[in-house]
Amino acid sequence: MGGIGKTTLAKLIYNDEKVTRYFDLRSWVCVSVDFDVVKITQKIYMSATSQDNCDITDLDLLQVKLKEALTGKKFLFVLDDVWNEEFDNCDSLRGPFESGACGSKIIVTARNGVVAQAMGAYQTYSLPVISDEDCWLLFAKHAFDNKRDSANPNLEVIGRKIVEKCKGLPLAAKSLGGLLRSISNEEEWQNVLESHIWELPEKCKILPALWLSYHHLPPHLKRCFAYSSIYPKAYQFRKQELILLWMAEDLLQPKKKMMEEVGEDYFNDLISRSFFQLTYNDEDEGSLFTMHNLISDLAKFVSGDYCVRLEDNDSFNIMRKGKTRHFSYMEDDNLDSEKIEALYEAKCMRTFLPLADKWRQESKILEKVLPDLLLKFQCLRVLNLSRRAIWELPDSVSKLIHLRYLNLSGTLIEELPDAVCGLYNLQTLLLRDCECLAELPIGLGRLIHLRHVDFRGTKLAKIPSEMYKLKDLQRFPLDVFVLDSESKIEDLKELQELHGRIHIDGLHNIVHAGDALGANMREKKYLTKLALEWGGDTDDSRKDHDQEVLNNLRPHTNIRKVTIRGYGGTNFPAWLGDDCFSNLVSVRLDNCANCFSLPAPAQFPALKKLKLSDCPNLVCFPDGGLHAPNLEEIYISDCKNLRSLPEEMRTTLMSLMSIEIHNCPELESFPEGGLPCNLETLSIYENCKKLVENRMQWGLLQLSSLRHLGINFDKCEEEIDSFPDEGLLPTTLTRLVFGNLSNMKTINSKELKRLISLQPLLIANCPELLCLPDDGLPISLSDLTIFRCPLVTQRCEKVKGEDWPKIAHIPDKDIF
């Protein structure tokens, strides 16, 4: 049954920590109705080789390549939502899988038991509906946000009756729970319970619970949800992408908020009602979402003839009626000349959305008819040609006077035609990863409605000067804003609506420190990430100047992440540790050669990551320590004169989970109070000889949470014949890495066998190590890597038997 939890169960398995450690390769492929062996094989091959694209379409050659990639590797593949019942199709897919290592697994989810037989399933599981009590718990989790509504106990009575109508289907319970989350009125709950929609005939393929969820949406959300039917089943989309499409189609109703904020509210509301579901979380690029197949069916049904996906001939029969407003398709092969003629009937087309599942997908027909299409679709508001093998945009684009969204990302265009400068209603212009793009028309600055522009990943180093006057720009178009003889810091003054990140480079080119005030950084309240970079030599003549520049670039207090690189001042500005900057979660200081201390007092209430690298004059942390109660990670590298870490680390950094230190030769020890009790990872690598020599003072035995430990004995002057030291390591360790012990001949088996939870063990650069312990290794060990230990490697290669862990040979590079 659809919505019973097959994919959810498969995801729990696929993402389980033990599963991810066990398999060398994992790949998830959503198959759906179209069981295309070439496409499925391509997706698995891309995942197995970490490639973004695969142009091989010959199945035999593709399978040879996949077989080579899988040879000797233990893999887990999930084929989700399979409908194919033909054994021959399944059999042709399986060939390369036989080269995988013993223990490889394939999970298939399907609605039909015949599919399982066709796939040759070794074992099948028919998921039952969940119990009424479990169904109630799932419903209550979403309806009451994990809390019971104590104000009205009658809601639980009504809710349990609603749950009975869900008949044990998790998707139904989740959907209705999301519907009633924001409703506390008993009468409205009763209306849902008594709705006639529960009595829909079985021939209606839409679940009554989903119908109810849609029926109770406010009108503005109904319109936005219906528009989302433009995405094919199982298609993964980003929140920002869909919001920009809604904005282009006038589906957002801004009041006192910006359109993007309204779109964010709409999107989050649909998530809370389970219309969209998160598939991959990515803070930097934007998380991926999808719709359950049954939700997608609902969206397609309610959008009617106005929103058409090219999936079969019926799609074009609908288009011939002339009602279609929004159109999408995945494959150019399906778009022949006859179907193009049907497209021409949709004269009021507003969205033309070719979606590519491959990078720079060939588009011969589209390339041929594109000029004509643009002339026919003069009501168009959305045009997406991203990831297509298109070399130029025809001048006929100038006829699209209503166009608000133009996406050419990932195409092969070398320049943008001047005709684009006449699209005065354009809100979104996306050219990301157009690697050949080297020139922009000067007149782009005339497009005063532009809000979203992305030129990252192109050859462009600058934007036309007039674009700095576009006050509604939401993001800076390029990866870096470079200051030179043509670009001035004052250019940023008018861009007050910038969101996200900005990286300013070339700050050493500011002649008068007061000019930095012209950027008006304090008023850019939507910026969350700021990177400031100087170049050239950090000599004494720059100390005061750089310090004044940095003070004048003080950002708004909403900033969350700060990176300062190449700074020549002796002190960091007071604002960096100011209580007002309570939102700071990440601070990175890199190549700040003259700085000797962090700002005092160093108050970072929300800080989670602190990274200090290449600060050779940094001697200590400020008096009074570092007050960051939520700090989780510290990374310190190439601070060659650093002598101490934050005082009272155990009490002031109670959330600290990871410490990594590289090349700090003067650092002798950790604070006397000891390391934080929640520490999970400790890595001491590369020229930290004094700290390593004092390792018995680290107090690791007191750390019941420590899981991962790495020690590099590089340049350590003491002679060590055996490792681990007695009384050094806690039994909680699950991963141990050590190396560069030039004199070590044996491993202290007694201490090593105490590590009853140890799984990966990595030993590197120990040329005198003769052998592994005669009385064995920890029984929990799952993976052993021996690197540049020639004597022991030769002996291990002769060992046979299933009781030994796998010996993994890794490339000839420094694992530290």
Image: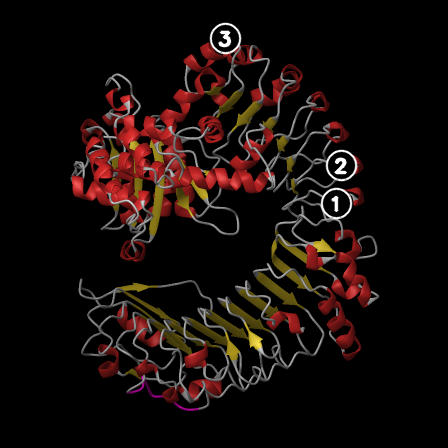
Marked residue nearer the N-terminal end (2 or 3): 3
Of the image marks 3 and 1, the number of the one nearer the N terminus: 3
Instruction: Write the start and end of the magenta stretch as one range.
Output: 718-726
Number of the label disc, if any, that sits on residue 463? 1
Question: In the rendered image, is residue 602 in sight?
Answer: yes
- Are dots 3 and 1 in contact, CB under 8 Å? no
Q: Helix, strand, or loop for circle 2?
A: helix
Give the prevailing secondary structure in the magenta stretch: loop
Residue 645 magenta-drawn? no
Residue drawn where x is 58% and y is 72% of the image = 613
What crowding class fits label 1: few (fewer than 14 Cα within 10 Å), some (14-19), or many (20 or more)?
Answer: many
The label shown at residue 444 is 2
Query: Which quarter of the figure has residue 380?
Result: top right
Asked if residue 100 shows in the view, the reply is no
Give the labeled residue for mark 3: 321
**Residue 397 picture location, percent across and down:** 69, 24
- Of the 4 image quadrants, the one containing the C terminus is bottom left
Q: Is residue 140 above or below residue 167?
A: below
Cα separation between marks 3 and 1: 44 Å
Quarter of the figure that contains the N terminus: top left
The disc placed on residue 553 is none
Label 2 and label 3: CA atoms lie apart by: 38 Å
Q: Amino acid at mark 2?
A: Leu
Give the SS element for disc 1: loop
**Is residue 721 found inside the magenta-colored segment of the image?**
yes
Q: Quadrant of residue 756?
A: bottom left
Q: Viewed as shown, does residue 446 lie left or right of 290? A: right
At horizontal 17% and vertical 43% (from top left) the residue drawn is 133
Q: Nearer the viewer, mark 3 or mark 1?
A: 3
Name which quarter of the figure residue 311 lies in. Answer: top left
Say if mark 2 contacts mark 1, CB within 8 Å.
yes
Please provide percent x and percent y for residue 333. 48, 21
